[in-house]
Image: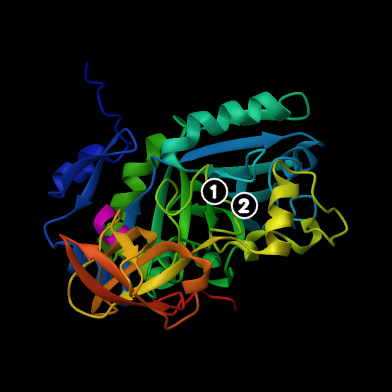
Amino acid sequence: MSTELLKTPLHALHRELGAKMVPFAGYDMPVQYPAGVMKEHLHTREQAGLFDVSHMGQILLSGAGAAKALESLVPVDIIDLPVGMQRYAMFTNDSGGILDDLMVANLGNDQLMLVVNAACKNEDLAHLQKYIASQCDIKPLFEERALLALQGPQAVTALARLAPDVAKMTFMQFARASIDGIDCYVSRSGYTGEDGYEISVPADQAESLARRLLAEPEVAPIGLGARDSLRLEAGLCLYGHDMNTDTTPIEASLLWAISKVRRADGARAGGFPGAEQIFAQQQAGVARKRVGLLPQERTPVREGAEIVDANGKIIGTVCSGGFGPTLGGPLAMGYIDSAFAAVDTQVWAIVRGKQVLMKVSKMPFVAQRYFRG
């Protein structure tokens, strides 16, 4: 029995632009346009790329108890999140594993906007309804709103022509904005390591806005292929690949995302699922960690490849890998035994039965260029 793929409000536009479509998280999505992944990647790094990320789930929480309620499910400071700011968060389970990662924005007036991953959005909604529905109103906006990402050093130039105030925003700020007469929510953030914006737009106006943005000389349409190579160069995790319910934030090298106020010695320590396990790992260390990996030859190393030490003993697995057009070579991330996690440690990936030498690398592989003002 085949289930029909869902379509975003930009589906017809992707077809018109000559996109190659592939199934992704239950949606029919553009993996690339005629320019190809390499050119799309480099265009985003040099100018501005427009991505359709409408498959992601947008959820509105409202009510005086919303911030406190959400804080009970994530290891992040939501109560003191300033109005007009956004923060990265994770839903954890009772063993400290990651159910999903998400963005949380404070809209003011006791309203929070969440953006969750496409493949997890129904489970995330059920999770919120199960645990905090009595404390706040939970409204999924899955059908009502689309999401566009405009990324790259010229994103500000292109978007400011249509909405001048966005030029004043800094990294992780969140605001209402009228773009070419369309009421939108805009955050200065993204998933490429570049400066840029994510734009939440009413679904019925998404195509009109996308066409308006694509009419700007700096802007080109970008597919999922380049989105993946850009985020990999930026050292950013993809849920379901680089982290999952069996991975804790400590193992995933995401300690930075646990707010200081919520850590073991913080003013509001714990109080989220799996806190004791996460704190214990932070104290005692973990057996394996997510690290950056740079293959020392031209062979790309893909997800699922085993990682071995000099004696051929399996010490880990690659979770994401490919070619980095900006880096000019292959790159990967993987989970390896902590004894091998130091930068410049030599390890080997098994690719089609052969050993490929890799070095553990610091991340990001390509410097992030977020606009912090």
The reply to whether callout 1 and callout 2 are in contact (CB within 8 Å) is yes
Magenta-drawn segment: 224-228
Q: Position of residue 18 (x, y in %)?
A: 12, 49
| Residue placed under numbered mark 2 in the picture | 89
Secondary structure at badge 1 equals strand
Which residue does the image show at 32% across and 33% down from the upper left?
26
Q: Residue furthest front?
A: 311
Q: Position of residue 151 (x, y in %)?
A: 39, 65
Is 120 colored magenta in this rendering? no
At 31% from the left and 43% from the top, the residue drawn is: 207
Q: CA distance from mark 1 to mark 2?
A: 6 Å
Q: Is residue 62 above or below residue 17?
A: above
Residue 79 against residue 295 in the figure, above or below: above
Q: Which residue is mark 1?
A: 101
Please state which amino acid type lies under the numbered disc 2.
Answer: Ala
Seen as rendered, the residue at the extreme right is: 267
Magenta-colored stretch includes residue 225: yes
Most common SS among magenta residues: helix
Which of pointers 1 and 2 lies earlier in the amino acid sequence?
2
In this view, 176 is above or below 369: above
Query: What residue is at 74 percent from the left and 56 percent from the top?
Result: 279
